[in-house]
Amino acid sequence: MAGVDGADRLAPGAQQASTPGDRPPLVAFVTDAASDAILRETLLTELGEGAEVRRGDVIAAMKALKRTATPLALLVDVSGVEQPLTALEELAQVVEPDVRVLVVGERQDAGFYRQLTRGLGVLEYLFKPLTQEMVARHLLPYLRAGTAPRDMHVRGGRVITVTGVRGGVGATTIAANLAWHLGEEARRHTVLFDADLHSGAAALLLGARTTNGLRSALEHPDRVDELFVERTAQPAGERLHVLAAEEKPAETILAQPGAAARLIGMLRRRYNFVIVDLPARGAPGAREVLDIAHQRVLVTDASLAGAREMLRFAAIPNAPTQSRRAVTVLNRAGQPGMLAEAQVKEALGEAPDLVFPWLPKLVPGAADLGEAAGARRGPFRTNLLRLAQEVAAIRTEGEEPERKGLFARWFR
């Protein structure tokens, strides 16, 4: 076990050392069905052939690994184990010393985390319930690159792009409400960046003002600094700002190479989340933004053209900073004259990750008033909370299971 004291040789009867090429990339042991499904969806699709998820706790892992080759990485579940530290020490005696160990469990106290990561050399510990975002963000980097340093994650806020795969599918509504939820309800410093400088509606949806500062930032990136960002981003709430413009339709934006990336970098210094309402086509610096996104959200309606475009956009390779595939959203499901959900699923080859229903009264009415549709209880808000959990690993107190303790801050 990598870094585990006293694990520098195999115990009698343990497997002899095998070559890296003979060892599976990952074997994971978890005790519950929900965690099993999350790990299969997030890790197995990434690691490919040889990786597997089994049901069982750390004791079951120890018994199994006495008879089989040690994987390159091992994930074990200590939920319900009376003496988890002792069990992990015993596990170290039956695995090869270079194995990379990850642990999941139910305990949330900081002392337990320190004992695992500092005392036993465990690379990372996550507490349940797991989400795809948590697993992709905190576990995948270790599995891709080996034993990663603690500061391997880029410092600064997370960049989440929301793109409608075709015009008029409601991506701006979802982006604006996601930003509103993260800023106003989850209490994270959040900025909504509307990358459509000519006809964007993000500021309108949140009742915020637009300025000419965004155009200046893209055309003259040398002028962009933290003070510029502070003056240009307009408040839409106590912890929510909007960066948007309303340029004349006939005017061309002469964005400079690297300008969008520089602007995003400045925003990340100030905000926990940078939500980018990124049009499918024509946005200045769109490729730069996609290449630095931590997570992409793709939105379509229930049309055949929308399904076709969704497949095309989903095929765009992940950014280097993107730990999982794009989150797919079907918006306005059930709208008259459109495809049924089953037909959309058939056209896509799989079900979309989230489905927002057609709400002809709620959503347009909230937009006209400059209010967040997600503030009202109902199916729109329910799916908005699920989206926030998927892309930001944030749950809402009183509506989703609450995380408590010091870990709640570390894993957001």
Image (cartoon, helix red, strand yellow):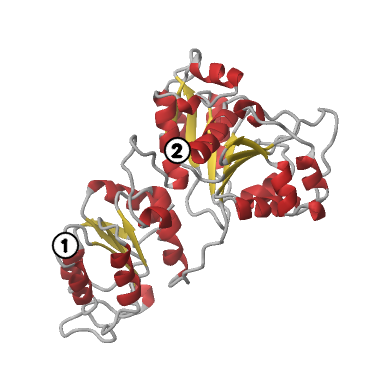
When the figure is inspected, residue 1 is found, relative to residue 401, above or below; the finding is below
**Residue 35 at x, y = what percent?**
28, 50
Q: What separation in Å lies between label 2 and label 1 (alpha carbons)?
A: 33 Å
**Residue 234 at x, y = what percent?**
68, 38
**Residue 330 at x, y = what percent?**
48, 29
Identify the amino acid type marked 1.
Val
When the figure is inspected, residue 303 is found, relative to residue 48, above or below; the finding is above
Q: Quadrant of the N terminus?
A: bottom left
**Residue 283 at x, y = what percent?**
72, 39
From where the camera sits, is residue 285 visible? no
Number of numbered tags placed on the structure image:
2
Identify the amino acid type marked 2.
Leu
From where the camera sits, is residue 180 visible? yes
Is the residue marked by circle 1 packed among few (<14), some (14-19), or many (20+) residues within 10 Å? some
SS type, badge 2: helix
> Residue extending furthest front?
238
297 vs 193, nearest the viewer? 193
SS type, badge 1: loop
Residue 387, labelled with which disc? 2
> Are dots 2 and 1 in contact, CB under 8 Å?
no
Which quadrant of the figure has residue 163? Answer: top right
* Residue drawn at 76 percent across, 52 percent down: 224
* 252 relative to 36 in the view: left or right: right
Query: Which residue bears the numbered disc 1?
Result: 81
Label 2 or label 1, whichever comes before in sequence order: 1
When the figure is inspected, residue 77 is found, relative to residue 192, above or below; the finding is below
Is the residue marked by circle 2 packed among few (<14), some (14-19), or many (20+) residues within 10 Å? many
